[in-house]
Image: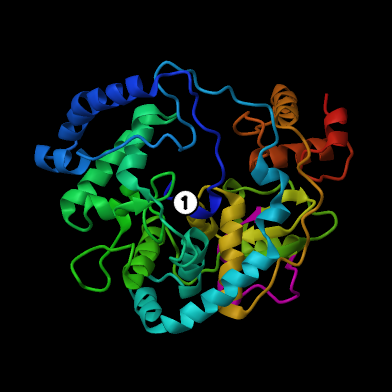
Amino acid sequence: MATVSLALAGSFAAPVEAASRSAVEAQFRQWIAGDLWRAAQEGGISKETFDRTLQGVRLNWDLPDLVPPGTAPPKEQTQSQAEFSSPAAYFNEKRLQGLAATGRSLADQHAATLRKVEAAYGVPGPVIVAIWGRESGYGRAKLPHPAIDVLATKAFMSTRKPMFQQELISALHIVASGDVSADRLMGSWAGALGQPQFMPGSYLKYAVDFDGDGKRDIWNSVPDTLASIANYLVRNGWQKGRDWGFEITIADGVSCAQEGPDRAKPVSAWASAGISRISGRAFPSSESSQPAMMLVPAGTFGPEFLVTPNFYVLKEYNNSDLYALFIGNLADRIAHGGGAFKASWGDIGKMLRSDVLAMQKVLVAQGYDVGKVDGLPGFKTRRSLGEWQAKNGMTPTCYPSADLKAKLR
């Protein structure tokens, strides 16, 4: 994962209080001097950088997902996954309209910079601006946490300690580079940095100095921010000259059970099979021979899409279909004054995760490939449901529902 969006931050339960905080604080200091120093030294960090950066580090007890020594990780609850239960809320129209209006204004304000960035990287300005807006409200969102405190806390006592320890060592490399001092290394509750919300490892790979001042400043420099986002996308496979995707209508008799990046077809083949743009316009001629993939994140109960490989590059920024659709829709609004998806999101997602898990197990037992058996309706689960429906004489809907669960035994 490249980023952890500020917009996703919410309220979190306080960590378990059973452990004595003073005892934990003492163990934290021992861990820094022992295990962390050894790992940092192996990672190429000097003792001077290590001591200077960590001399004032403090545990942040208010962060989520903490597992203090002597406590057990929280048990996973049987519940609905928010992203799949409320797609309509994810695409809040008032918020999208506000982001689009501000995005168009900033795209005009920074038009010269965006032209240079697009010339250098081949990523359209509206896509870059959309990510900038989604991640940090165009740099206006507060970055309340010293990143070193966040990363050290999570590396010491979170549910993903190894990952955060590596990110902490990457942050030490950032300080050692001279781009930013430790006291100005501010980020989110998850340790994501600056206006693009890069995790430290992503900063080291993708941040660029585009304004020529010798520092990669994604906190204060708009040119560095915009170019760093573009560089991230290009390095993850962005194809110059291609769109992200199109909202479509799937004709009657054409199954929704054809989605997924592993079932790509030329756009012309999809059109011949009965797929058309919901706007009524033809697909661009430049896309005709290019591969595209069906995407039906809510089955037939919501908007339907043909997406290009660039859609999956957007998912590299944040591994979520809805996130990539949000960015694509916002970019279209900024570029063309577009609006909401024309099809509405149905009243879906009231299934518990345990219900979807049970359906997945039945499908697997019958020889279907549902991907990961985890209670989440990913594209392999959705299309397997559609294939099962067709095999059993039903019109495919490609999404778990209570009536489908009752039939799938």
Which residue sits at x=88%, y=35%?
403
- Number of residue marks: 1
In this rendered view, identify the residue nearer to me: 262 or 198: 198
Whether residue 287 can be seen here? no
- Is residue 207 inside the magenta stretch? no
Compared across the picture, whether 49 is left or right of 377 comes to: left
Q: Is residue 289 magenta?
A: yes
Q: Say left or right for 114 vs 216.
A: right
Residue at point 10%, 41% (across, down): 48
Nearer to the camera, 38 or 259: 38
Percent x, y of residue 215: 21, 64
- In percent of width and height, residue 386 lies at 77, 41
User: Circle 1 sits on which residue?
Assistant: 316
Q: Give how far across and how far down residue 29 sits, in percent.
A: 25, 27
Quarter-of-image position of residue 41: top left
Say which of 73 and 331 sits in front: 73
Residue 234 placement: quadrant: bottom left
Badge 1 element: helix
Furthest-top residue in this view:
70
Q: Quadrant of the N terminus?
A: top left
The quadrant where residue 195 appears: bottom left
**Viewport quadrant of the C terminus:** top right
Residue 54, image x and y in percent?
22, 39
Q: Which region is colored magenta?
A: 276-294
